[in-house]
Image (tube, rainbow, N blue to C red):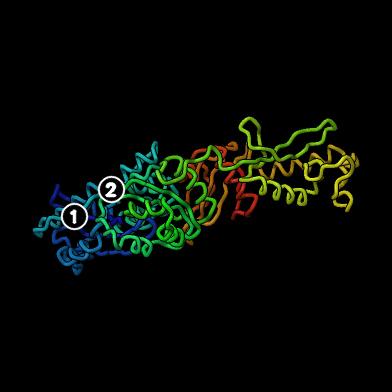
Amino acid sequence: MYAILDIETTGGKFNEEGITEIAIYKFDGQEVVDQFISLVNPERPIQPFVVGLTGINNEMLRNAPKFYEVAKRIIEITEDCVIVAHNAKFDYRILRTEYRRLGYDFQRKSLCTVELSKKLIPNMPSYSLGKLVKNLGIPLTDRHRANGDALATVKLFKLLINKDSHKEIVSRSVRSNPKIQIDTKLIRIIDELPSITGVYYIHNTQGDVIYIGKSKNIKKRINQHFTNTNHKSKKIQHEVSVVTYEACGNELLALLKENEEIKKNKPKYNRALKKDIFSHALYKEKNKDGYLELKIGKASKDKKSIITFTNLNQAKSSLEKIVEEFNLCEKLTGIHKTKGGCFRFSIKECDGACIGLESAENYNKKVKKVIEKYTYRNKNMLILDRGREADEKSVLLIEDGMFKGMGYFNLNFQVTNIDIVKNIITPMQNNRDTQHIIQNYLRKRKPFKIIEF
């Protein structure tokens, strides 16, 4: 659990500043679960340059609560939380100073989004909150007011968690949280999980990831893990300390995220990964008469495929649909092996390429339409779909036919600047597995929108 906060102060000499405004959002890694926002009477004058910067003046704070009046609420909302702030060293120091004046030793673990941003989003022109979120397409209102800056930090932190592929942020948080008792932990873990589409991570008491999976309903899937009686499930039940998750918004992103995370983290209870998640593919070759033939074959790294399939039955079923959709010949696709006309020609649904009635030039145009639809080779495109929340969309970036990564953007942000898109996406591996997942998705479902550039 995280307490994402921002503090405005009076300014002045080091350790003599007072808090004028504070905003805290309690964040569980996916959504805000509690919040506290308040002006604070610092009982000391505000520096003139600070008044000009924040708009907060002494008159505004005359009737605001003093720090000791809000101190209990701040302790409650930050309890068992990691403090997160943009330049956390400053905000955490100010809080500790205020509590020290009251004779209380305030201690929390902390994370700084400036440091995290420099590590996870290198080479940005500036890491000041205002310039950084602008370059990432994150909306920011009420700059230099605690609530506006804290909300922007929440959105920035969500993006950083997505980019943290090695799960250092989450693991550090898991280790800092109190441990759950063995006899109640499974029920409590299930109760706290949502019924959403995403990727889940099962951690042990050291914070290490021991299993990764994806599901359209995370709560239901974890319940299955905790009620199964097979050997692996019992091992997981015994070792689990915490289950964290990432909402993905749609199944495509969940599939890609799961595939990437398992390969990268190699959890001990995930089955040894096969080299590929598909076994068969669709290939094209030109016959002696000049016709392009589409044929199913075993997946091979040495041949360029049009589409890949998880198994032979899926391949055959998909090819039959393609033949029907594009009015292709069953003989030239290997579905109907015959010396004469194919079955579709006998029922007048094939234009006769099988017996030379349809020219190779005309027939090959139809085959090329298949290739155009089901491959993104050499293409530059964005695939937009549902996001994790109502006010956002997801985006996948494909550049020069290479899958670059995925991310999320606010609906108020227009996806027109590819450089900003590159900043907000989490870079991911481009390999045959990711190509298979994306092509499979495009073949089966219609994504929200495709933008070619």
Is 51 placed left or right of 434 in the picture?
Answer: left
Q: Can residue 422 be seen at all in this image of the molecule?
A: yes
- Image spot of residue 388 (x, y percent): 47, 57
Name the kind of residue labelled 2 in the image.
Answer: Leu
Residue 388 tag number: none
- Image spot of residue 21 (x, y percent): 24, 60
Contact? badges 2 and 1 (CB < 8 Å): no
Q: Quadrant of residue 223?
A: bottom left
| Up/down of 91 relative to 295, above or below | below
- Image spot of residue 27 (x, y percent): 33, 58
**Residue at point 47% right, 41% down?**
272
Is 292 placed left or right of 31 in the picture?
Answer: right
Please state which of residues 26 and 126 is positioned toward the viewer in this rendering. Answer: 26
In the displayed image of the protein, which residue is found farthest to the bottom? 63
Quarter of the image for the C terminus: give it.
top right
- Residue position for label 2: 111
Q: CA distance from mark 2 to mark 1?
A: 15 Å
Residue 95 tag number: 1
Name the kind of residue labelled 1 in the image.
Answer: Leu
Please state which of residues 194 and 331 is positioned toward the viewer in this rendering. Answer: 331
Quarter of the image for the N terminus: give it.
bottom left
